[in-house]
Structures are given as structure tokens and as C-alpha cells.
């Protein structure tokens, strides 16, 4: 799949689920729950034990289903390359790293770095990032998207942090291309309640579909 097609699928999916877990088994169960709830883009963080193996397993499980599997919390180029070799279809970082950007460009994989300022956004764009993660979203708020789109009208922004079904419409009204949801979405997994994770995903996707209709 070409990089442009991957980006289109991430954006068209509307919601990216950030998956953190204490074990590989828990991570896979969380992914199963959010996918059952309708979410099609998954960011498996590198804090998950045996993250590369989990990515490879998930890519195999969801091959041909339209579910996108990416690697998150990627801090340096070695991890990015290993994730790509394991099958990761996109790479996400909490900050911008030019060496990670170079590796992703080499392999034609989308790199979605975290930014908080116009300077960081410009640097990420200069190194080829076509989708930028606004992080932490709950600190800067939806107005930051409007502000960034002033000097950078063509920038694609996905906010991460503090996104939920109650405020998702604010983010899209501000110009978000998609949104990213993590702790609030998957929190019930901590007590083994994967049914509640699925329910949270369904609520978030329902809210997203309401945004599209209005």
C-alpha cells in the first residue's frame, strides 16, 4: 500500500485508538475490543512488552480487513525501523525526531510526530510529515488547530490527549483531520473489562459519525 493511501485510510477512519498495555496478551485483547467497537486505526505503543511481535501478530490478524496497525511512542530510528520491518503501517512519536522522519521517508511509511508549537509543526512538515499529532491536546485545546492553520493552511492535524465523545465535535469544527484517543477509551481494560472498552469505542465512533452528518 502506498504512503498516500495509508494516510487517506487513517484520516478517513476518523479515530485512532492508542493502545498501551501491561502485556502482549492484554494489548491484543484491547485491539480486538476497539476494532469490534468500530475503530479501524490502531497505534500500538512501544511501551507494550514485545511490541514488535505484537505488531506482527496484529498485522497478520487484520490483513485485508481495512484495519491499520501503526507503532506509537517511537522515540528513535532503530525502533522505527524494527516496527516497520514487523509490519507497522505508520509511525507515531510524542515529539519530532528527524532521524525517525528519515527512516520513515526511506521506507515510504507515514510519520506522525507530536508537535505543540508552530516551529515544531514547520520542522515536521519540512521533513515530510503530512499528518501532524497535536500533543498534548488537552493542554493546547481545539483553538490551537485554528491557529496553526493560519500560517499552515494545508496542514493535517490529529489531536491526541483529552479527546472523548463529548468534545470530538469541537476538534473537528476546529479543523482536525482525525482524532486520537487513548487512556479514556481503553481504561476499563485495566480491570479486565474489555466489553466496556468496546462500548467506549462504539460511543466514540457514534459521536464521530454524528460530526460527519452535521
Image: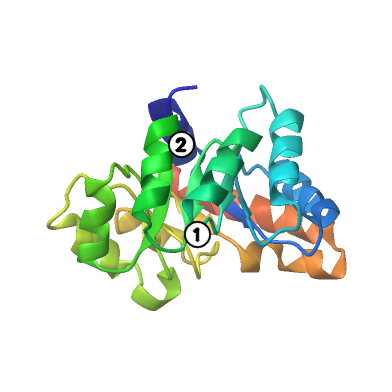
Q: Compare residues 178 and 88 and report the one nearer the observer.
A: 88
Label 1 Cα neighbours within 10 Å, binned few <14 / some 14-19 / many ≥20: some
Which corner quadrant of the image does residue 103 belong to?
Answer: top left
Question: For the residue carrying disc 2, how many other residues have a C-alpha within 10 Å: few (<14), some (14-19), or many (20+)?
Answer: few
Q: CA distance from mark 2 to mark 1?
A: 26 Å
Nearer the N terminus, badge 2 or badge 1? 2
Counting from the top left corner in percent of width and height, residue 207 is at: 54, 53
Q: Which mark is residue 99?
A: none
**Can see residue 11?**
yes
Mark 2 vs mark 1, foreground winner is 1
Q: Quadrant of residue 186?
A: bottom right
Using the image, tell me which numbered label, if any, was put on residue 75.
Answer: 1
Against 17, residue 68 (above or below) is above
Please name the residue that numbered disc 2 is placed on: 12
Q: Is residue 16 visible?
A: no
For mark 1, give the secondary structure.
Answer: loop
Residue under the image location 79 percent in, 65 percent down: 22
Q: How many labels were placed on the picture?
A: 2
Tag 2 and tag 1, C-beta contact below 8 Å: no
Residue 57: give x, y in percent of width and height.
76, 37
Amino acid at each position: 500500500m502506498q504512503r498516500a493511501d495509508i494516510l487517506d485510510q487513517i484520516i478517513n477512519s476518523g479515530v485512532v485508538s492508542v493502545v498501551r498495555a501491561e502485556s502482549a496478551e492484554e494489548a491484543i485483547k484491547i485491539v480486538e475490543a476497539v476494532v469490534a467497537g468500530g475503530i479501524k486505526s490502531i497505534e500500538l505503543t512501544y511501551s507494550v512488552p514485545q511490541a514488535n511481535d505484537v505488531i506482527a501478530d496484529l498485522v497478520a490478524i487484520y490483513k485485508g480487513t481495512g484495519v491499520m496497525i501503526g507503532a506509537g511512542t517511537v522515540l528513535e530510528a532503530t525502533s522505527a525501523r524494527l516496527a516497520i520491518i514487523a509490519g507497522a503501517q505508520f509511525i507515531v512519536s510524542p515529539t519530532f525526531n528527524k532521524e525517525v522522519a528519515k527512516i520513515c521517508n526511506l521506507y515510504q511509511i507515514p510519520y506522525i510526530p507530536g508537535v505543540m508549537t508552530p516551529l515544531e509543526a514547520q520542522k515536521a512538515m519540512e521533513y515530510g510529515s503530512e499528518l501532524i499529532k497535536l500533543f498534548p491536546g488537552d493542554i493546547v485545546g481545539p483553538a490551537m488547530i485554528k491557529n496553526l492553520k493560519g500560517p499552515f493552511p494545508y496542514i493535517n492535524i490529529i489531536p491526541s490527549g483529552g479527546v472523548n465523545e463529548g468534545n470530538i465535535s469541537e476538534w473537528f469544527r476546529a479543523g482536525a483531520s482525525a482524532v486520537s484517543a487513548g487512556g479514556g477509551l481503553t481504561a476499563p481494560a485495566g480491570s479486565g473489562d474489555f466489553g466496556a472498552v468496546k462500548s467506549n469505542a462504539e460511543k466514540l465512533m457514534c459521536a464521530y459519525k454524528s460530526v460527519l452528518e452535521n
